[in-house]
Amino acid sequence: MAVTRDKRFNELWLTENSSDNLRLSLKVNEVLHSEQTKYQDILIVNTPEYGRTLMLDGAFQLTERDEFCYSEMMAHVPLCAALNQPENVLIIGGGDGAILKQVLKHDIKKCVLIDIDERVIANSQKFLSSICEDAFKDNRAEIKCMDALKYIKDIKLNNNLKFDVVIVDSTDPVDFAAGLFMADFYNDLKQIMSDNGILTELTESPFTDTDLMRQAIGQMRQVFNNVKLYWGAVPTYPSGMWTYGIACNNLNINLAEPVRNVNNTRYYTNEIHRASFVLPPFLSELIK
Amino acid sequence: MAVTRDKRFNELWLTENSSDNLRLSLKVNEVLHSEQTKYQDILIVNTPEYGRTLMLDGAFQLTERDEFCYSEMMAHVPLCAALNQPENVLIIGGGDGAILKQVLKHDIKKCVLIDIDERVIANSQKFLSSICEDAFKDNRAEIKCMDALKYIKDIKLNNNLKFDVVIVDSTDPVDFAAGLFMADFYNDLKQIMSDNGILTELTESPFTDTDLMRQAIGQMRQVFNNVKLYWGAVPTYPSGMWTYGIACNNLNINLAEPVRNVNNTRYYTNEIHRASFVLPPFLSELIK
């Protein structure tokens, strides 16, 4: 999806086809970067409504103005629900560094970030530094540009590293990212997670991606004993109502109940954590 | 805003300019009705994404698929928080009947609905009957097509009627609706409310209408002792994150704590009621 010119007003607009029947468009002040990588199309623009905006393969990934809604809920919910203080965290995807920045607010030892596309990382550091700030330079961060499946295999074979929290910040489940929402993948992850390890993954919108959300939760349930859904607002994601799947094996962990807090947040609080697990009946019905 | 043809695919699309810099577009299967009334432009279309959709003056008002998110939160939060079982309810605007339908789920005596534009009511009954169903025929419903300000004046002069719940379901605060977000109007309303009466009004999006939201809450605080903000998801409203102002004079009423329940809902529950008053820090900061 390219930036198009609205000839009536001589304006540039960037449009996401959220579905075949729904579009979200942002006016564009300036195109900062455009690149076709080995994996995807990267587009970074500046918009008056949401600030700098990263689009991958035609889908809005994050904007300066609303990324905290998503990044904080992806990072702090599992990190605050974990039984013991998490030490090792794995982020799969997330090459923009937004979730990494949130994870590093916690007293962890190490956060490994695996993104398949080094160009996302490089361009985010260059054009979205207001979002990722110094996260990539933190000495607890270990950045790897490779296929997550290969990394998991390597860890299983050669390493005793176990992760206390795994955050899957994938693009939409098509092409190379499709496997990241399947039971086989969750099974692989389970083997590199600690006994009380927690997995979190975006599960899309109950309005625009109903089937996908249900399937992802269903696949998680095949692998983990304790699976829940939580939700929040993310204005630039389809429908603005966004869901997250969270899973662990220990049934005694109440994922909806935080056992620690985190400072310096704009969306997440312990109260928001609890509230985000309260589902409207239409939503709990969908994942019955 | 008219329906436009996307020539690349020979498709009809309907676009809302949520702001000067943000647009939401729905593909259109069929234009059901288009009319310029004395007050506004009415457009009713059928869309594959959200079903039948009502647009007034270029702004999406409701769709078959997501109206329950808004209507239930507008109706059930004040009705379930009211100290004593509400008897008399006033809806200002809401000519589509969606909120009226929700109000009538409660054991009330009378619900007066005042919409300035009789054509909204007539067209909703004709084209959006799946939403308003039999609400307009309920013998507890009293429908009036007139200016709300005149109605309030009449009630004050000639009547002892006091309302236990007032719901202001206005269009966006421009033109004839602008006054419906001001202290003068709230003062008028206060005089026709019972001592423990509760007022609820949409207060727009914290992302796309930040100033408006703050102003509306500020104006409410000038008139009522007990003012709170709650929020929820409404996919077809700007940014999808929607806020509601709620106000009463009795400081002993905990507006966030429901004292009764309602059956047959898809978004509202007593738990959602409580959760919707939990604000992300960025939002509570805005209305400090």
Image (cartoon, coloured by chain):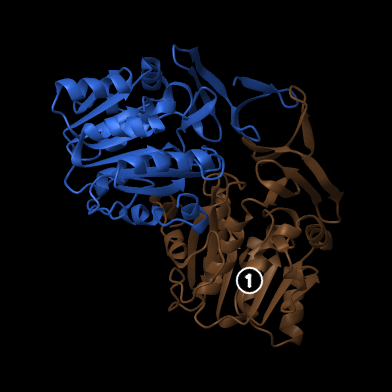
Chain colours: A brown, B blue
In the rendered structure, the answer to whether residue B140 lies left or right of residue B186 reads left
Percent of width and height locating residue A224:
53, 72
For the point 53% across and 59% down, the residue is A267
**Residue under the point 40% across and 33% down:** B181
Q: Is B121 placed above or below B189 here?
A: above
Residue A91 % position (x, y): 68, 69
Q: Chain of mark 1?
A: A
Front-lying residue, B13 or B245 = B245
In the displayed structure image, the side of residue A230 where residue A60 appears, left or right: right
Indicate the quadrant containing the N terminus of chain B: top left, top right, bottom left or bottom right: top right
Res. B149 image quadrant: top left
Q: Amino acid at mark 1?
A: Val
The residue sitting at the left extreme is B160
What residue lies at 69% left-to-right and 56% top-to-bottom?
A171
Return the residue at label 1: A103
Q: Position of residue A14 (x, y in %)?
A: 73, 38
Task: Give the SS element for disc 1.
Answer: helix
Placement of B69 over or under A155, stated as above or below: above
- Counting from the top left corner in percent of width and height, residue A272 is at 46, 61
Quadrant in the rendering for residue B136: top left
Q: Is residue A124 above or below residue A221?
A: above
